[in-house]
Amino acid sequence: MDLSEAQLAAFIQQYFLPFVRIGAMFMVMPIVGSRIVSPRVRLALAVLTCVVVVPILPPLPKTELLSFASFGFIVQEALVGLVAGFTFQIIFQMFVLSGQYMAMKMGLGFASMNDPTNGVQTTVLSQFFLMMVTLMFVSVDGHLVLIGLLVKSFQSLPPGSYLLQIDVFWRVVSLGSWMFSAALVLALPVLTSLLFVNMAFGVMSRAAPQLNIFAVGFPFTLMCGLLLIWVGLSNFIDFFHSAIEFGFQALRENLRL
């Protein structure tokens, strides 16, 4: 079988550009992009997804492999994948931040553990919320929907025939402000209730100075915080659905779907 250099270059280019977009998303997206998943597993998933997706894609522009145009196409594909994965990474980190707000207020800030997802120290409450969100996200096939949106982006953003606008990056940056505000809204009932508890202990300390507030207030505040979190779990599913829908809507806007 005769195989020319031009045919080999076209074959590599046909698969390489989609692989860059898919691989970039798998490197930063939740669950698959965590440190507990081996890079070899991510690479294998990216290769398998690329093999399935490429036959349904429109023809890609033919350029020389070693050229500035090809380098620009590769950079753009990597940016699209990073935007897709990082958008949902912000959604997940919102729940982690909310857990840190609650833990610091109720006295669990010292109870830290290693986060296997990011390799940093986070509070136990943040890990609890992160595990719940991860299980719920997988149970509703959110990871499959995320991969499906990326596959559809090859129709709205064909490789080599688009240019990312600055408003896409601005929307991704604005998700940071949404993360802080949404985390505060989720933690606000617990923070407000614990504020009144602390105010009550302040009044008690003035009325009975001989009472050891640190010995009594710390376990009482901790138990009240845990009770409030348990009561608030009844609304956690609704908040999760609203956050996930917001994330998918933001991703559709960024990918022009």
Image (cartoon, rainbow, N blue to C red):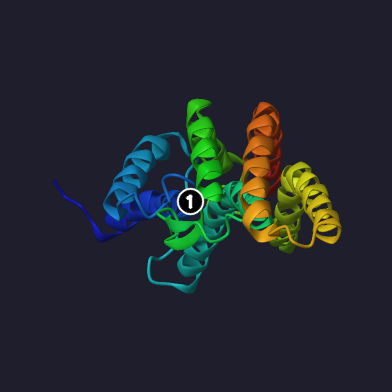
Q: Where, quadrant-wise, is the N terminus in this rendering?
A: top left
Position of residue 175 relative to residue 120, above or below, is above
Displayed quadrant of residue 145: top right
Q: Which residue is labeled 1 in the image?
A: 25
Residue 175 x, y percent position in the rendering:
71, 54
121 or 198: nearer the viewer? 198
Looking at the image, the residue that sits furthest to the left is: 1
Residue 198 x, y percent position in the rendering:
78, 54
Q: Where, quadrant-wise, is the C terminus in this rendering?
A: top right
Q: Can residue 198 be seen in this view?
A: yes
Could you tell whether 39 is left or right of 76 in the image?
left
Residue 76 x, y percent position in the rendering:
55, 61
Q: How crowded is mark 1: few (under 14 residues within 10 Å), some or many (20 or more)?
A: many
155 or 218: nearer the viewer? 218
Element under disc 1: helix
What amino acid type should be assigned to the residue bearing mark 1? Met
Q: Which residue is drawn at 69% across and 55% down?
A: 105
Looking at the image, the residue that sits furthest to the front is: 210
139 or 214: nearer the viewer? 214
Position of residue 233 relative to residue 79, above or below, is above
Could you tell whether 86 is left or right of 217 in the image?
left
Residue 100 x, y percent position in the rendering:
62, 55
Q: Is residue 61 visible?
A: no
